[in-house]
Image (cartoon, rainbow, N blue to C red):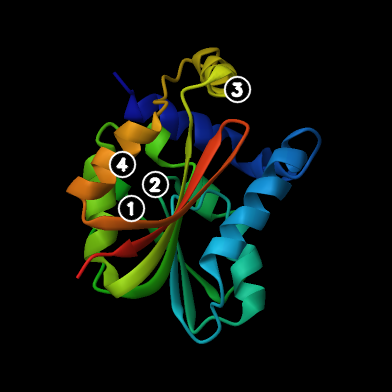
Amino acid sequence: MINVRNIRTYFNKKSKKYHTKSISFPWCLIRKFEKNIIFSFLGNVRNLKIADVGSGSGYYSKIIIKKKPKEIYAIDNSAEMLNQIKEKKIKKIKQNSEELIINKKFDKLICAGLLEFNTNPLKTLKNINKISKKKAILVLLCPKNNFFGKLYRKFYLNNNIKIKLFSTLEIKKLLKKSNWNILKKDEFLLSMIFKLRKNG
């Protein structure tokens, strides 16, 4: 069972150095490949409303804001993580993705490295769907249940945090139930990355 309190405590504690570590070796190599795929799938964001769900310290939000979106919202359950985002044009919302209520609709969304920490990934995907415009694009990144994914899971187990790993079949079932259609899929080491369109 995923312990939400342990996760929040861990990320609050790590928040001040989290961004620096994420762009340091060896994580920077993984992030570089993931980033290239994510932004290839996300496409043009200029003058669009964008949401970064599970933003953490804003790694992707900070890149997106340079591409001149109409609005960019960083959404995360950790206040300390959100405090690391200093860019005034990035709007911050502290909310749990499984209880997400925002009176906004977005053109494009990112959810990268969040589902594995959810007690109910389906609920998160449904909530993201609710804040998406008709035919919105969602770029989803989640860890595979393979050798590299198991190393990733072991890292968090050593910090008293249990995370989920996913098979392609499991993700496809979740996406179907949450009304997302797969347009593209790519993989890199432990990561599966999907370009999705909201059905309807």
Q: Quadrant of residue 195?
A: bottom left
Q: Secondary structure at mark 2?
A: loop
The crowd level at tag 4 (other Cα within 10 Å; few <14, some 14-19, many 20+) is some
Distance, label 1 to label 3, CA atoms, is 30 Å
- Where in the figure is residue 7, as x and y percent of width and height? 43, 30
Mark found first going from the N terminus, 1 or 3: 1
Mark found first going from the N terminus, 1 or 2: 2
- 161 above or below 129? above
- Where in the figure is residue 3, as x and y percent of width and height? 33, 23
What amino acid type should be assigned to the residue bearing mark 1?
Answer: Gln
Q: Secondary structure at mark 3?
A: helix
> Mark 2 = which residue?
77
Q: Quadrant of residue 29?
A: top right
Q: Quadrant of residue 38?
A: bottom right
Distance, label 1 to label 2, CA atoms, is 5 Å
> Mark 3 = which residue?
148
State left or right for residue 40 relative to residue 111. right
* Residue 128 visible somewhere in the drawing: yes
- 44 above or below 18? below
- Where in the figure is residue 117, as x and y percent of width and height? 39, 33
Tell me whether circle 2 and circle 3 mark residues in contact (CB < 8 Å): no
What amino acid type should be assigned to the residue bearing mark 3?
Answer: Phe
- Where in the figure is residue 90, as x and y percent of width and height? 53, 71
Q: Secondary structure at mark 4?
A: helix
Mark found first going from the N terminus, 2 or 3: 2
> Mark 4 = which residue?
172
Q: Nearer the viewer, residue 141 or 40?
A: 40
